[in-house]
Image: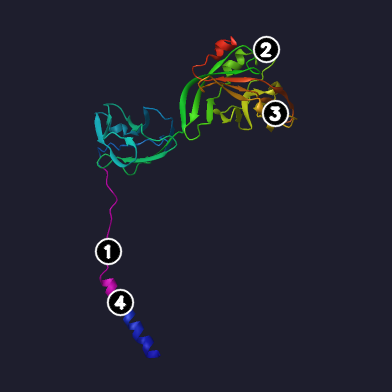
Amino acid sequence: MKLNKIIIASIAAVLFLVSCDNWNDTETLSPTVDAGCPAVRFAATNPTSFEISPSNDMSLTLTVLRDSSAMASALEVPVTILRDSAFTIPKSVSFSAGSARTTLLIKINSSAIPGSTLTFAVKFDDPNINPYKKEYATYYGTVLVSPWVNMGKAQFYDDFVFAGMYVTEVTLEKNFLNPNSFRISFPYSEDILIATEWKDASSNWIGGATQTNIVFTLNGSNVTWSKFWYTHLLYQGTTGQEIKAYLPSAVPVSGGKAGDNKSVVVKDGSGNIEYFDLFPYYWIDGVGGFGLNEVLVGFPGFDLSGELDIPVF
């Protein structure tokens, strides 16, 4: 047994010596940067993800920088495309003489499907880059082609908030992936709330929460929405007492479901939507509410202002 151990140890030592003899030390030098290098790179302020509404002219813009010490002359820099799933990307960017920044305009092909996520990557190469800059010469981007398709301008009227004074315009969008889902841009700007007299010498109810969009969903002939939407108003101006337009069934009062059923979609003889006739329950959490009040959303092509004889703000 001792003999076997001695033989095994000797073989291991020989293998070690052979492997050491075949080992070659290598040395990798850090890259050098020429004195006149413009150090072209993508600005750190560029977002890495985008959401773009579907259209025939979808695009995004990236800011590109160079060192101010190299900006005296005009400069054209090649762009290397690393990844391109549905984009039209220029082969170069150009700096004007005296400018330390320019832009790279990237177009998304109109065939891109709403709801799809697209990726791309581009870079600048030697001798135009400085690898020691905090910004990068390579850019990786993601684009979500929004499933929301712009249908145009709609008219919005809230009988509780606007009190017969004004109709306002909003952007109306339809969800490509769910044709029963629609959304509008937030209609309660501070300007219209002032014009409809929620702020005067004695009181100021403006200042409640806002949101980007309000989403409505068709369920047969009825229209529903998430639990509530904000009105940008505070009850008696009290912090935390938001006036919200609740789906009636979400309010702790009797008859909530029946209240939900009051909100309907109205169509013309050809089945095209003319307007939503909505009845949210205006409620302040922990305080109470003002009951059901009518809200109307007139689709593009339907003159809600004319029907109500109320001017557009």
Between 52 and 220, the one lying in front of the other is 220
Magenta-tinted stretch: 15-33
Q: Nearer the viewer, mark 3 or mark 2?
A: 3
Specify which label sits upstream in the sequence, 1 or 4: 4
Find the distance from the CA under tag 4 to the CA under tag 3: 87 Å
Between 96 and 140, the one lying in front of the other is 140
Find the distance from the CA under tag 2 to the CA under tag 1: 83 Å
Find the distance from the CA under tag 3 to the CA under tag 1: 82 Å
Residue marked by disc 2: 201
Residue marked by disc 1: 25
Question: Callout 1, which amino acid?
Answer: Asp
Q: Which label is found at residue 235?
A: none
Q: Quadrant of residue 69?
A: top left
Q: Is residue 75 left or right of residue 83?
A: left
Find the distance from the CA under tag 3 to the CA under tag 2: 40 Å
Residue marked by disc 4: 15
Specify which label sits upstream in the sequence, 3 or 2: 2
Question: Callout 3, which amino acid?
Answer: Ala
Residue marked by disc 3: 258
Q: Nearer the viewer, mark 2 or mark 1?
A: 2
Tell me, yes or no, whether the two marked residues, 3 and 2, touch with CB atoms within 8 Å: no
Counting from the top left corner in percent of width and height, residue 74 is at 24, 28
Decide whether residue 54 is among the magenta residues: no
Counting from the top left corner in percent of width and height, residue 199 is at 65, 15
